[in-house]
Amino acid sequence: MADWNRGHGAVDDELDAENKLIADNLATKVSRLKSLAYDIDKEADEQNSYLDGMDSNFLSTTGLLTGSVKRFSTMVLSGKDSRRVLCYVSVGLVLIFFLLCYLVTRAQTSGG
């Protein structure tokens, strides 16, 4: 009877050692997952704060554009002289745009 218990004791020891090894591997994987979850949470918080900053920037830009549109509408509706000035400014901006496009294209072809 003593021999029979001794044989099972060795098998039990092997199974315990194998279970401990598997438990250690599992603990390592759980630790990695916890670290990964922490990193994801940290990245999400950073992205949320970045988006909040963008939201406030968009709101301030919207305020600027609204004010500009109101001033533009007032100028257009004010009289003939204002419309003439507005027309000259618009034509001048279009000409400056095309001049800049030409200069950039020429610089790229001669520099490249």
Image: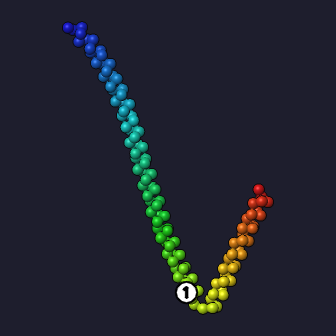
Which residue, as the protein is rendered here, is positioned at the far right? Answer: 110
Q: Is residue 64 above or below residue 111?
A: below
Task: Choose top left, top right, bottom left or bottom right for residue 7.
Answer: top left
Which secondary structure, mark 1?
helix
Number of dots carrying numbers: 1
Q: Which residue is mark 1?
A: 74
Q: Quadrant of the C terminus?
A: bottom right
For label 1, the crowd category at 10 Å Cα-Cα, with few meaning under 14, some 14 to 19 and many 20 or more, is few
| Residue at (26% x, 15% y) in the render | 9
Which residue, as the protein is rendered here, is positioned at the far left? Answer: 1
| Residue at (30% x, 16% y) in the render | 11
Q: Is residue 87 left or right of residue 55?
A: right
Q: Position of residue 74 (x, y in %)?
A: 55, 86
Q: Is residue 10 left or right of residue 38?
A: left
Q: Position of residue 40 (x, y in %)?
A: 43, 48
Judging depth in this view, the residue of 11 and 95 nearest the camera is 95
Task: Choose top left, top right, bottom left or bottom right for residue 76.
Answer: bottom right
| Residue at (49% x, 75% y) in the render | 63
Q: Is residue 93 above or below residue 48?
A: below
Task: Choose top left, top right, bottom left or bottom right for residue 93.
Answer: bottom right
Q: Quadrant of the N terminus?
A: top left
Q: Position of residue 15 (x, y in %)?
A: 31, 21
Q: Is residue 81 above or below residue 16?
A: below
Q: Identify residue type, mark 1.
A: Thr
Looking at the picture, the colour scheme in use is rainbow
Q: Position of residue 34 (x, y in %)?
A: 38, 42
| Residue at (25% x, 11% y) in the render | 6
